[in-house]
């Protein structure tokens, strides 16, 4: 060894004969199954004096391993059962720290050398971090107190797992929680001196190791964590205020996990942040003068030319959202005044828009550019549903797959929406789908009740609201400015979004709403397929040609949208369990009324 180690015993559990409060021990964990003397776990860690202590209520910065390093570990003794338990428990640290533990044979070179009750040593201790490298290959850098290496009840106990977690925390460079500047453990100086002097400690050592804490300037500290695995039990009688730590923690706390992940970043796989998909365009045509189309007026929206008896034509912006290509503008059509007021009231008019704008001037072309056109289920005007075609461009190649969305398509869209903590489901949908200020023409902005949102998806859903089927236009607008309805592939169905009704499927046949089209991307375009692995509680993201071994593919819908929200496509991993995804979907469905 390069140096004689400086042993810092921060937790001493003596074999005491008295049960009085005055005889409680720092770090004491007593075995309730002991028939005679109480079994006590004693903790310590060791460090080389040359390196000193520079800590983070958690980490010794000078003793950290290189991020991403593989630390080689070997056992100097111990039963297979004990060794396997160490491997199993220590692996939990690697779920959060970007450090791997590789176990090698006793004759191999290792960084960490583990022993169990080495030469009768009844103290559980470990060297801190890279100080383990200073220890000779035939000597332990970690000693674990184990009373019986063949006692599976002891080996499989939560207490033994706590020992392993704590000592491998030291291996990663972590010290004890009470040493930080925010520990809140107010030790009584005289009682601490009296307690440790019988163990042969000098007053200087007691002061340096037990009583001194580290300032904010000495450490990159975190706030005190009463649930940390690195917190020792301090009995109340050693404190000035009668308040000890009073806890024997056996698991990693949420703060332990987050902190070690910060110290050794990169292990945990995070889902991709939402990014807008590619923007494109499609050319749409609808013929008129036939059943389902003869109530509409031919018009070329690209040129602004009426085409009586011809086609309704327009180039629509598209955007990819999740696994779909959506039209990113509301449908534009005009109705002919075929039978008096039957079709006249379907169209917008300057007078109606003027009234909606509370007297402010809003030109009809600007309004229709933002809000599109009413669409209905009237049989004379359903060309938008039954007789349309999409092309890559005018006179270009036809594009197949675009259609009005079904329930599963919209539910998948909702599941894809990023979730803001504290937001309602409807609030997340507003942020994701509703148009932003920059999406609305200036002439439209004076409209009463108009609100603007983030439009994270780029779909620019504009809140036209709903319109009743009263021919005289009385009371025609519902939820204007903050709600909209989408015509669905399912006949006579509207998917409605508004502050009044929330999110639901509305089965009112003749309400006028909007229309958008979507196309599910092909497997080849996506480059992956999703499967449900119930045995391992996972959603698997596999290559298109990968063998799924008989697993069921995850169908379209809310659960698939949520799974995509937790996807890391580079690593082809869904970062949430299948159970968590189903639970989140069930919770969302409480706020969504669907068929």
Image: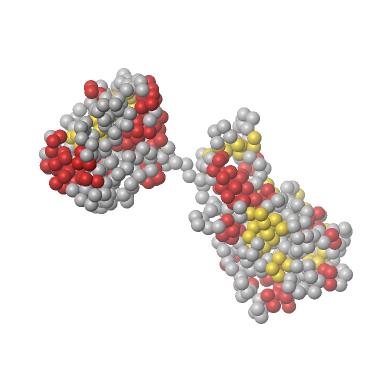
Q: Residue at x 41, y 29 (%)?
A: 88
Location of residue 44 with respect to 482 vertically, above or below: above
Location of residue 45 with respect to 393 vertically, above or below: above
Residue 493 image position (x, y, % from top left)? 74, 56
Is residue 8 visible in the rendered image? The answer is: yes
In the figure, residue 318 lies in which quadrant?
bottom right
Location of residue 458 with respect to 344 vertically, above or below: above
- Position of the N terminus by quadrant: top left
Residue 551 image position (x, y, % from top left)? 63, 32
Is residue 569 visible in the rendered image? The answer is: no
- Towards the viewer: 290 or 550: 550
Residue 592 image position (x, y, % from top left)? 63, 54
Q: Residue furthest bottom?
A: 359
Q: Residue furthest top?
A: 107
In the figure, residue 466 lies in which quadrant?
bottom right
Residue 404 image position (x, y, % from top left)? 73, 53
Location of residue 342 with respect to 392 vertically, above or below: below
Instruction: Tell me: 486 left or right of 430.
Output: right
Number of numbered discs: 0
In the figure, residue 141 lies in which quadrant?
top left
Q: Residue at x 59, y 58 (%)?
A: 426
Q: Residue at x 77, y 73 (%)?
A: 473
User: Please, which colouring scheme is shown?
Assistant: secondary structure
- Towards the viewer: 423 or 220: 423
- Towards the viewer: 485 or 99: 485
Q: Residue at x 56, y 45 (%)?
A: 583
């Amino acid at each position: 060894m390069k140096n004689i180690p400086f042993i810092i015993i921060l937790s001493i559990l003596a074999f005491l004969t008295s049960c009085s409060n005055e005889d409680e021990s720092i770090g004491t964990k007593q075995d309730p199954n002991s028939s005679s003397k109480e079994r006590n776990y004693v903790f310590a860690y060791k460090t080389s004096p040359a390196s000193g202590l520079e800590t983070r209520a958690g980490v010794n910065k000078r003793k950290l391993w290189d991020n991403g390093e593989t630390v080689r570990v070997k056992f100097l003794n111990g039963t297979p059962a004990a060794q396997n338990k160490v491997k199993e428990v220590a692996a939990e640290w690697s779920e959060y720290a970007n450090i791997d533990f590789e176990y090698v044979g006793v004759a191999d070179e290792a960084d960490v050398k583990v022993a169990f009750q080495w030469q009768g040593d009844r103290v559980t201790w470990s060297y801190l971090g890279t100080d383990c490298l200073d220890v000779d290959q035939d000597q332990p850098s970690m000693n674990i107190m184990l009373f019986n290496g063949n006692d599976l009840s002891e080996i499989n106990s939560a207490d033994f797992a706590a020992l392993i977690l704590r000592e491998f925390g030291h291996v990663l460079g972590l010290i004890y929680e009470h040493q930080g500047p925010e520990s809140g453990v107010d030790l009584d100086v005289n009682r601490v001196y009296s307690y440790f002097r019988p163990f042969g400690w000098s007053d200087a050592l007691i002061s340096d190791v037990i009583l001194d804490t580290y300032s904010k300037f000495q450490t990159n500290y975190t706030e005190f964590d009463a649930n940390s695995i690195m917190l020792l039990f301090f009995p109340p009688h050693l404190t000035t205020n009668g308040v000890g730590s009073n806890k024997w923690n056996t698991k990693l706390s949420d703060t332990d996990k987050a902190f070690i992940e910060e110290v050794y970043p990169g292990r945990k796989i995070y889902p991709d942040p939402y990014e807008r998909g590619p923007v494109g365009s499609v050319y749409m045509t609808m013929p008129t003068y036939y059943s389902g189309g003869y109530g509409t007026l031919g018009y070329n929206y690209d040129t602004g030319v009426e085409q009586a008896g011809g086609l309704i034509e327009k180039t629509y912006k598209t955007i990819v959202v999740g696994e779909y290509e959506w039209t990113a503008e509301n449908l534009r059509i005009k109705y002919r005044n075929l039978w008096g007021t039957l079709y006249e009231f379907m169209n917008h008019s300057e007078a109606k828009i003027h009234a909606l704008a509370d007297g402010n001037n809003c030109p009809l072309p600007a309004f229709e550019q933002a809000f599109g056109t009413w669409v209905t289920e009237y049989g004379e005007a359903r060309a938008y549903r039954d007789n349309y075609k999409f092309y890559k461009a005018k006179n270009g190649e036809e594009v197949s797959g675009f259609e009005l969305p079904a329930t599963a398509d919209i539910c998948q869209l909702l599941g894809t929406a990023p979730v803001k903590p504290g937001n309602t489901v409807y609030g997340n949908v507003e942020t994701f789908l509703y148009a932003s200020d920059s999406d609305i023409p200036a002439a439209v902005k004076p409209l009463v009740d108009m609100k603007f949102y983030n439009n994270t998806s780029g779909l620019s859903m504009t809140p036209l609201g709903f319109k009743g089927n009263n021919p005289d236009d009385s009371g025609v607008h519902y939820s204007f400015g903050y709600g909209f309805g989408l015509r669905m592939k399912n006949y006579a169905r509207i998917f409605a979004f508004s502050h009044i009704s929330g999110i639901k499927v509305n089965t009112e046949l003749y309400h006028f709403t909007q229309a958008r089209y979507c196309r599910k991307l092909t497997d080849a375009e996506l480059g992956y397929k999703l499967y449900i692995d119930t045995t391992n509680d996972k959603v698997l993201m596999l290559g298109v040609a990968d063998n799924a071994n008989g697993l069921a593919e995850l169908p379209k819908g809310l659960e698939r949208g949520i799974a995509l929200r937790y996807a890391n496509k580079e690593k082809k991993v869904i970062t949430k369990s299948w159970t968590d995804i189903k639970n989140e979907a069930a919770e969302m469905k409480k706020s969504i009324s669907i068929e």
